[in-house]
Amino acid sequence: PATAPPRRLWLAGRPQPAPCNAVFAAWRAAGRLTPALLWTRIERAIRAGHVGLAGYLARYLDPGDRHWVGLWRRVHEDPTRVLSAPAFEVDHPMGRRILTYGITRQARADAVQALALWEQLKGRQAFGEGTRRRVTREIALRLALQDAPAWEECLKALGVTATAGRWGPLRLRAALELGDWQAVIDLIHRLPPDRRERPRWRYWRARSLAALGEARHAEAVYAELAATRHYYGFLAADRLGVAYPLKTRRSDDDTEALAELARAPGIRRAHELLVLERLPEARREWHYATRDMSEAELLRAARLARRWGWHDRALVTLARTRHADELDVRFPTPFRETIERHTAAHEVDPAWVYAIIRQESSFMPDVRSPSGALGLMQLLPRTGRSVAERLGTRLAHRRELLDVETNLRLGIAYLARTLEMTRGHPVLATASYNAGYGTVRGWVPRDGTVAADRWIETLPLAETRNYVRNVLAYTTVYDHRLDGETTVLTDRMPPIGIRLIH
């Protein structure tokens, strides 16, 4: 380790081997050790339980600051001492830092007592609003994990709500946000058996086992998940370093059978309406024509819709069957020339664009959402106008967003702008496309970073959680569909932190 960069060794927060001492001495002599770096190592040492190291490091502080280390060590050993320490009577940045540490540490053992302490102490120091909310939120989440009285009211006061029967998953998300891996395992075990065995919770059980040092048990769960084709399966495969199950089952089209199906009165009417671009009526006719079909007939109908280039009906129809391996039907690639032209101009991944389109509109060019979003990429008219102006053009009327070329041109430009605002972070850009950049910025941790899978799982909006998971999984499949190569999903998921976003 003595060959590693001194700064990285210094910030490890634990005692280093003796050969590192000479490295540190030379580093200090060169004036590279700043007060901020010194306090960072002291804090990390205390958080890791190496209070002796923290005491040793105090010798490098100015004499007037050394008493803070002694106070911090005492708070670590018994957080309730924060009440009796006279140092906290006067506002001081270091006092605020130690006090919040003591409160959150006490919350792990007794959140009710921590809440009482916080209510008494938060007025003594000039805490910023962000710090107040962060500490209050951590106490509330700990109250939830400890099943303390009134924990639901505490969370509701913070704007965290859930319907009856949904507090269990919320408590699981609280445990994930806090990184309390044993609590994650315990809460998953308390879920009903059918929910416990869902891929989502199997993955998080494995993640928790791995974090607790149970690598062999974690790998067994990962291996089962890695054989499946979805978001959690891809993440599990990445943990094991194995390939994704992306082999496509080629459609075995029976030309005569498809021709016979196309002659059926309802199917024929649907096709005629499709040709006339009366799309809502065509979809209704298709629905009535296929509603009583058998599994084999639905599969044939999905293949027929795909042959016609009616990709949204192919998707919907195939979803009613158990034939999930027909990836050419489930993940179509229409408008490819247009998409690749605009993605090349804006340096955006076409697989990501296809994933967004599949999630947003299922390839229905005429779709309109209740919020007023339009077209393939579901652009709001005000967004379309803003993007058009940035491109030096004009959107005369909102109905122009129903034109495929216009929608893709503006939608891809907007996606590129979102990626730029999030400094090229695919997860943050995807979440921003769904929930808005300002909203997502408020969800990004202010202190340090968090693993992207944990961040996604603990997002406050279920719609955005599902959206981001789906888009990431779809991007992985489309990556393979477009050129036969696949970027590892976790490479698209770097850590999340406020310094990673404008």
Image (spheres, rainbow, N blue to C red):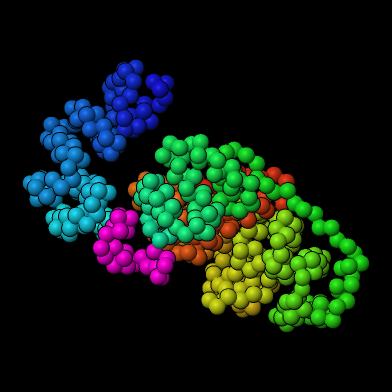
Where does the image place residue 4, in percent across and percent down from the top left? 42, 24
- Front-most of residues 69 and 411: 69
Query: What residue is shown at x 27% (from left), y 56% (from top)?
Result: 139
Q: Is residue 129 left or right of residue 166?
A: left
Asked whether residue 46 is in view, the answer is yes
Asked whether residue 276 is in view, the answer is no
Establish if 376 lies above or below 224. below
Where does the image place residue 245, in percent across and percent down from the top left? 68, 47
Q: Is residue 150 left or right of residue 389?
A: left
Query: What residue is shown at x 47% (from left), y 59% (from top)?
Result: 192
Query: What residue is shown at x 59% (from left), y 42% (from top)?
Result: 223
- Front-most of residues 394 and 481: 481
* Residue farthest to the front, as pictured: 193
- Front-most of residues 444 and 79: 79
The quarter holding residue 250 reads bottom right
Classify the position of the N terminus by image quarter: top left
Exactly how many numbered labels are in the figure? 0
What is the span of residues highlighted in magenta in the rendered image? 142-167
Where does the image place residue 150, in percent across and percent down from the top left? 26, 65
- Report if residue 155 lies within the magenta region: yes
Q: Is residue 106 left or right of residue 87?
A: right
- Report if residue 462 lies within the magenta region: no
Establish if 163 lies above or below 451. below
Q: Is residue 201 left or right of residue 367?
A: left
Query: What residue is shown at x 60% (from left), y 66% (from top)?
Result: 360
